[in-house]
């Protein structure tokens, strides 16, 4: 359920987005795109990452019926989470946690488990 909650957090952040982070400068440091484009792309990739995480949680719950299904979902969620952070982080080191670095670390930990522990949940 932790994975599903993490996914729900991504979806909510994608829908509520930048207006929830005080001091957000409006343009990603890692990409050269406009503020409007950044908001649209950040919304899309956050919702996509959250959806993949929720699907991964469901796949973990039904693992005996669908062994191994969680792994590609976890790997995809980790990659999309990295993209979500890249589209939102504006380069402020002091705001990195507020702007998604902690969520990214959790997603990358799940990705690491999917790669390192292929037999888990079977």
Image: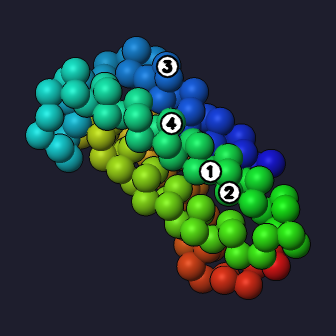
Image side of residue 68 versus residue 98, left or right: right
- Disc marking residue 56: 2
Q: How far is mark 4 from mark 3, CA to CA?
A: 11 Å
Q: Earlier in the sequence, mark 2 or mark 3?
A: 3
Point 11% across, 40% down: residue: 32
Q: How far is mark 3 from mark 1, CA to CA?
A: 18 Å
**Residue 14 drawn at (x, y percent):** 48, 29
> As displayed, is residue 56 above or below residue 40?
below
Instruction: State if disc 1 and disc 2 touch (CB < 8 Å).
Output: yes
Instruction: State if disc 1 and disc 3 touch (CB < 8 Å).
Output: no
Which residue matches tag 3?
A: 16
> As displayed, is residue 100 above or below residue 21?
below
Image side of residue 55 versus residue 17, left or right: right
Mark 1 Cα shell of 10 Å, populated few (<14), some (14-19), many (≥20):
many
Which residue matches tag 4?
A: 47
Depth check, front residue: 30 or 40: 40
């Amino acid at each position: 359920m932790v994975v599903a909650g993490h996914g729900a957090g991504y979806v909510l952040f994608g829908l509520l987005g930048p207006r929830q982070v005080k001091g957000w400068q409006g343009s990603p440091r890692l990409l050269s795109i406009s503020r409007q484009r950044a908001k649209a792309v950040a919304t899309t990739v956050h919702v996509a990452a959250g959806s993949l995480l929720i699907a991964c949680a469901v796949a973990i719950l039904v693992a005996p019926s669908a062994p191994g299904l969680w792994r590609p979902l976890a790997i995809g969620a980790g990659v999309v989470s990295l993209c979500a952070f890249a589209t939102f982080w504006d380069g402020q080191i002091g705001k990195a946690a507020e702007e998604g670095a902690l969520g990214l670390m959790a997603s990358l930990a799940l990705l690491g488990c999917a790669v390192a522990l292929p037999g888990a949940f079977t």
